[in-house]
Amino acid sequence: MLRDLATRDPDGLALDDLTRRRSWGELWDRVSRLARFLREDLGLEPGDHAAALLANRVECVELMHAAIRAGVWLTPVNWHLAPEEIAYVLADSGARAVFVDEAHRDVATRATRATVMVVGDELDAALASASDAPMDPEGPAGGPMIYTSGTTGRPKGVKRWHPPTLAATLDANRAGALPLGLDGVGPHLITGPCYHAAPLMFAVYDQQAGAPLVVMPRWDADQALSLLQEREIAKTHLVPTMFVRLLRLPEEQRADFRAPALRVVLHGAAPVSPAVKRRMIEWWGPILVEYWGGTESGVITLANSEDWLAHPETVGRAVPHFEVFAADEDGERLPAGEVGTLYARHQRGAIFEYHDAPEKTAACHVAPDVFTLGDIGRVDPDGRVYLSDRASHTIISGGVNIYPAEIEHALQEHPAVADVAVFGVPDDEWGESVKAAIELAPPATPSEELERALLAFARDRLAGYKVPRSVDFVSALPRHASGKLYVRRLRDPYWEGRSRRI
């Protein structure tokens, strides 16, 4: 489709990050050259790995298109991570080349021995001499290898299954995007960071079908409203935190907002207040489409606005090729309406694996075609899925997964900490925020000064969004004699009367 558009509308706008613009002709030329550059100039073979440590800009999209065509796995790296965390992801992924912007050149150079290529003038000069010959459509395809974490907090690279050839992969991507309303018609706005699977890949799949992309460098509610109107955006992806920010805009500004072209607003990956969602639907109309899934699975269920209003808090029914059911602790399927661990079955069979971690892949599968993401919930008699908890106690704040064990390990290094538990508490803006309960080691005593010192200690070791917002000092954490922590005894009082959902 990119090649067809480059032929039919070479000067039409294809990609714009509000600083750099690409026409369809320019995008096709750069994607073709980038794919050849990966394979021929950098020497990457099909199945090899590259990474991108980039702020939101056109190259994020170009690199993903090129990696798919080159048969290369591309890992977009979260630039909010601490340098040690970035180094881990680059090493674990086996990236042989890392594409960075100028702001991240130094951290990448210190973090890896791989080739570091700076986008902009340096990459443009390299592409000028690269071949522009399109890749063989019957050759192997690549794709994203996004990092996600489990209960240990150590991130894992997720490799999703795709067909063996480039042509078949592009066809499958377009077909899989259609149930989400990503049909290539009308501009698509990227509002979130491109290192997240959802905003980047939803946009890439939509563009593969013909949609022009507009990339916001960073989220800004005022700018988002302006772009939705002025660029006549048809589709976008938001997280509930963005809903809250939009609803906080002045009433007059919200009343003046008109975006008749906007017809699909995807959202998921974070708790959403029913009141907030109802207000968004009242304001924008029934164009919100909620999904449930994960980096491993992609989208498993969908709920349009009408279905959600009729069945509040559902995340919808399974999309084609998926089946969802709840099971008890013994793995036995539960009757409709009973709460248990949610499992998904895909008709194709196994659809993902963790990079170089077969034991972790096996741990979440009960059969090659049946897996769990660790979510707890129920399925009603009509097949609608409802989520109630996440077995791993993962905190989801503003659409970002935060893993308590990683934060606990960092805080446990402080000499004043005898024991620590980290969990999520309700936050009207972010869905959940991070709280730490700390048992102090004598002679330390609770104080505001010590709380500030502990948070500063964590901030030196973790990305900022992982640092607890607050600390509770406790005399003793509730642990079983075996050492198991009863985290719900700490967490549940904060959630009393509220629904904790994923």
Image (cartoon, grey):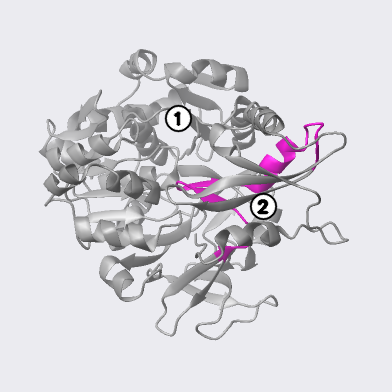
Image x and y of residue 418, in percent: 83, 41
The disc at residue 151 is: 2
Q: Nearer the viewer, residue 209 or 218?
A: 218
At label 1, the amino acid type is Arg
At label 2, the amino acid type is Thr
> Circle 1 is placed at which residue position?
39
Magenta run includes residue 193: no
Q: Residue at x 70, y 61 (%)?
A: 489
How packed mark 2 is, by other alpha carbons closer than 10 Å (few <14, some 14-19, many 20 or more), is: some
Q: In the figure, residue 302 lies in which quadrant?
A: bottom left
Q: Which residues are magenta?
A: 389-418
Q: Residue at x 82, y 31 (%)?
A: 415
| 335 relative to 31 in the view: left or right | right
Would you place residue 56 above or below residue 102 in this image? below
Q: CA distance from mark 2 to mark 1?
A: 36 Å
| 412 relative to 381 in the view: left or right | right
| 108 relative to 20 in the view: left or right | right
